Amino acid sequence: MQPMEYELVIGLEIHAELNTSTKMFCGCHNDPLEHHPNVNICPVCMAHPGALPVINRDAVEKVIRVGLALGGDISAYSQFDRKNYFYPDLPKGYQISQYKYPIVLGGNLHGVRITRVHLEEDTGRLQHIDTEMGHESSSSGQQATLIDYNRAGVPLMELVTEPDIRTAADARAFAEELHQILRYVNASDADMEKGQMRIEANISIRPLGETTFGTKVEVKNINSFRAVEKAIIYELQRQQEVLEQGEKVKQETRGWDDVNQRTVSQRSKESAHDYRYFPEPDLPPLNLTAGGGFDIEHIKNTLPELPTAKRARFETQYALPSKIISFLVSDKPFADYFEQASSELAAWLGESKRSEFQKASAILASYMSSDLQSLLVAKEAHITDTLITPENFAELVKMIYTNELSSRAAKDVLARMFADGSDPSTIVEEENLRQVSNASALDEIVKKIIQENQKPVEDYRAGKTAALQMLIGKVMKETKGAANPEIAREVLMKLLEGAQ
């Protein structure tokens, strides 16, 4: 009997902290990563008696921007609700969220239908520590929990999808694309390492060909794209083993244990009625129309070019490889920097020289995605931190394109530019790095290399062609990378074969 084949059914719930200046319902500074605990708090976010919430307009507009970017419908009417559930890190004892009337309904991303996008407040942060009790240390240690309320009340967007995803790779791709959109429309910094974007996967399996859904398991607060994929794959295998043993999958909430690469049970899963939603009495309903102060058409017209459209344009305009396009577009400031430098190349070459412009742009993209990115990673910096102006980067590319600078010397020039922001032409002149492409100018240097390296010379003459590359390397070292390697090859071959 052949083993049963199962189909994965996945829906995602994704939370993102919005990058507003203040919290969702009060004027406290929105900085959940503040190093000092319990600094950004006030009577409203600490639920003091008589303190009343006020809706953050900027947070509402950011959710509208996300909804429009995803092709969703903006509700004319929206309201906030109380979600009654015990949160030890929310002072009120309930969360202000949205239930029946979210800001956004519908939408689509990568063929996955979006159910809704709504707005709520984030919880505080719990920190579990081991401590000592009394005056004597304990070998086992005692545990205490500290609460930092800086994050409590931070505006939190939640996006919910339909159960349309069928593979772990597709779930990861959806989350990565949404991550880019959130940054492009300036709704959230969405830094997963800082908890600014958290993913929950609702996972079930069913026999291949079945249309009825299986029992759903929710895996909460996954904090990396890699972990999303791994958690789903693990759940597929775990649920499959449960069913094959003749048992039933339990509806529950599980967490992802990144250390042991597995999901772990946390609690039984609640249903909507467990939260006892009811309209928030302290907040008025939202009128999301021009009459209510929200010009949806204007917001739509101010959206930037989105990642999908940008990737398509980059392919047509620059003829770059898809892998490099994906890298550039994944970070909007990086893509913007590339385009600013490319515009300098276009002005230099002129509009009529399209193929030459694309070749120069390819050099720019290659150096940005490799050498520049390596420098940024080593310094734990971002493109917005670099001292290199797009104009100077374009000038460096011009020198490479016209063979004024060898690829080896270009790396050294770029490193200096990155370190102090110097102009590339100044560096080339100061360090005498301009590429030597004149054969006669290389004659004496090549003769010296031949004289000082008789062993590889004899090897080359004996038919070991690899020795020629070693000699070219010696010429490059002698000239500090300034020699044109092709010209150096020609001069070497001429002198080596002519002297026999």
Image: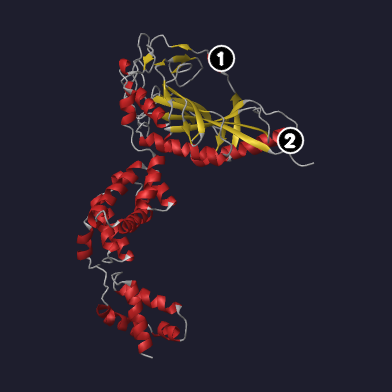
Give the residue type that dot 2 points to. Glu
Q: Which element type, helix, strand or loop, lies under badge 1? A: helix
Towards the viewer: 411 or 162: 162
Residue 75 at least partly seen: yes
> Residue 466's quadrant in the figure?
bottom left
Q: From mark 2 to mark 1, how far is it between C-alphas?
A: 32 Å
- Per the image, the residue denoted by label 2 is 244
Q: Residue at x 33, y 56 (%)?
A: 358
Q: Is label 2 in contact with label 1 (beta carbons under 8 Å)?
A: no
Towards the viewer: 10 or 377: 10
Towards the viewer: 452 or 176: 176
Q: Residues within 10 Å of mark 2 (few under 14, many from 20)?
A: few
Q: Residue at x 25, y 57 (%)?
A: 349
12 vs 399, left or right, is right
> Residue 499's quadrant in the figure?
bottom left
Q: Which mark is residue 226?
A: none
Q: Earlier in the sequence, mark 2 or mark 1?
A: 2
Residue 415, compared with residue 463, is above or below; it is above
Residue furthest to the right in view is 1
Residue 119, compared with residue 440, is above or below; it is above
Image coordinates for residue 49, horizontal then vertical, percent: 38, 9
Q: Residue at x 58, y 20 (%)?
A: 270
201 vs 53, left or right, is right
Image coordinates for residue 260, horizontal then vertical, percent: 58, 40
Q: Which element type, helix, strand or loop, lies under badge 2? A: helix
- Per the image, the residue denoted by label 1 is 273
Residue 301, compared with residue 120, is above or below; it is below
Image coordinates for residue 338, horizontal then vertical, percent: 31, 49
Q: Residues within 10 Å of mark 1 (few under 14, many from 20)?
A: few
Give the residue type that dot 1 points to. His
